[in-house]
Image (cartoon, rainbow, N blue to C red):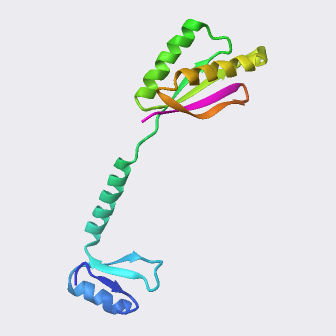
Amino acid sequence: MVGENIEVGVYPTRKALTMAQELESDLVEISPNAVPPVCKIMDYKKFLYEQKKREKALKSKSTKVTIKEIRFGPQTDEHDYEFKKKHAIKFLSEGAKLKAFVFFKGRSIIFKEQGQILLLRLAQELEDYGKVEQLPKLEGKRMIMFINPKK
């Protein structure tokens, strides 16, 4: 009887409770939304333990996505660009998602074409390491582009 599904419709609630008390166990409601609700005679503490264990196993299987950011100016020098590109390659090879953006300060917003060219060049040079998720898009004073790592 222990661990056996008991439909409350088949056994009235009192009978199910008395059966659980006779077996010195708990009457646990497994799926309350079912018609009739499904109950099981089992040890409630053990049920909670197994449920937590299942949730922990599912959580450990899911991967956490880390996002690394690289910031450029609209008129970033060649050396600085190469330095930041090297970091971007390192981030993508470690499996992190890359958020590259050009930040426009003050009146530098007039150079938005240069910022877009810079980001597209970066995307083209990082083609071996990652795939562009979102093309450069202007949001306020930033032009943002996302790159996912290749598996």
Magenta region includes residue 119: no
Q: Quadrant of the N terminus?
A: bottom left
Residue pictured at 44% horizontal, 77% vertical: 32
The answer to whether 61 appears left or right of 36 in the picture is left
Up the image or down, 71 lies above or below 33; here it is above
Question: In terms of depth relative to the viewer, which is nearer, 69 or 40?
Answer: 69
Q: How many marks?
A: 0
- Tell me residue 76's x, y (percent): 63, 11
- Tell me residue 57's x, y (percent): 32, 53
Up the image or down, 84 lies above or below 66; here it is above
Q: Quadrant of residue 17?
A: bottom left
Question: In terms of depth relative to the viewer, which is nearer, 55 or 148?
Answer: 148
Question: In terms of depth relative to the viewer, which is nearer, 104 or 138?
Answer: 138
- Tell me residue 56's x, y (percent): 33, 53
Q: Quadrant of residue 139?
A: top right
Up the image or down, 70 lies above or below 11; here it is above
Residue pictured at 48% horizontal, 77% vertical: 33
Residue pictured at 40% horizontal, 91% vertical: 9
Question: In terms of depth relative to the viewer, which is nearer, 142 or 3?
Answer: 142
Q: Quadrant of residue 63?
A: top left
Residue furthest left in the image: 23
Residue range (magenta): 142-151
Magenta region includes residue 148: yes
- Tell me residue 47's x, y (percent): 29, 68
Dominant SS type (magenta): strand
The answer to whether 22 appears left or right of 75 in the picture is left
Q: Quadrant of the C terminus?
A: top left
The answer to whether 75 appears left or right of 129 in the picture is right
Residue pictured at 30% horizontal, 57% vertical: 53
